[in-house]
Image (cartoon, grey):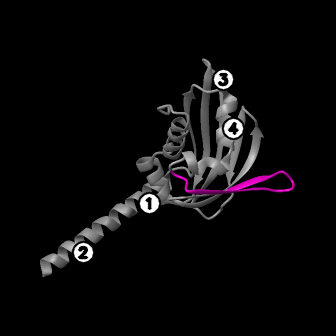
């Protein structure tokens, strides 16, 4: 029985040590990061933009989104709320240049992360290069460690871009 207690305490202590080390390393990383990924689709910039800009239809083609509510205010501001496996996130459309560029920003302040995505749609070889640049900040040191060394700062962008490619029937590899 003593051996079993010793083993359990050792496992708990080892896990606590690993979490402590991860949090310490995370606290030494800068909270801000910039990540950028691109794909090329055999579609026009206007067609790609139209799909990306239709926030309400995202659950039809994005594997990580279950529901989206869109609100367009009288002053023209567009807000949307995405519900997915990782919870609910509120966004604002900050810039919108149809067929060329779009910027969305996280409105929530209590998620442990924040930032914005800048989407660019550039004609290339008869198709469109879609680039997403993330200007993010991860305030939680443990999550900062995980996003840098486990998930990767481009993980969410890669999922998004692969889903976008599938929407057009194209297999893409973000780079």
Q: N-terminal of the two: label 2 or label 4?
A: 2
**Which residue position holds label 1?**
23
Q: Report whether 50 appears left or right of 4.
A: right
On whether residue 68 falls in the magenta region, the answer is yes
Alpha-carbon span between mark 1 and mark 2: 21 Å
**Residue under the point 75% across and 35% down:** 98
- The disc placed on residue 6 is none
SS at circle 1: helix
Alpha-carbon span between mark 3 and mark 4: 15 Å
How many C-alpha atoms fall within 10 Å of the one at disc 1: few (<14), some, or many (≥20)? some
**Which residue position holds label 2?**
9
On whether residue 39 falls in the magenta region, the answer is no
Residue 137: image x %, image y %? 59, 52
**Which residue position holds label 3?**
123
Alpha-carbon span between mark 2 and mark 4: 56 Å
Q: Is residue 8 above or below residue 15?
A: below
Q: Disc 2 vs disc 4: which is toward the camera?
A: 4
Residue 86: image x %, image y %? 51, 59
Q: Which residues are magenta?
A: 64-80
Residue 96: image x %, image y %? 76, 40
């Amino acid at each position: 029985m003593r051996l079993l207690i010793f083993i359990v305490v050792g496992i708990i202590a080892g896990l606590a040590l690993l979490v402590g080390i991860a949090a310490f390393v995370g606290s030494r990383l800068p909270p801000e990061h910039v990540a950028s990924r691109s794909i090329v689709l055999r579609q026009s910039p206007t067609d790609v933009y139209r799909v990306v800009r239709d926030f309400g239809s995202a659950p039809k083609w994005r594997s990580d989104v279950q529901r989206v509510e869109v609100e367009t205010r009288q002053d023209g501001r567009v807000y949307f709320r995405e519900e997915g496996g990782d919870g609910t996130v509120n966004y604002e459309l900050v810039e919108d240049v149809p067929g060329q560029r779009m910027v969305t920003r996280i409105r929530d302040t209590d998620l442990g992360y924040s930032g914005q995505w800048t989407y660019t749609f550039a004609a290339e070889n008869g198709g469109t290069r879609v680039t997403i640049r993330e200007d993010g900040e991860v305030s939680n040191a443990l999550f900062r460690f995980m996003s840098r060394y486990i998930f990767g700062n481009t993980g969410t962008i890669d999922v998004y871009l692969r889903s976008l490619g599938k929407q057009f029937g194209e297999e893409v590899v973000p780079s």
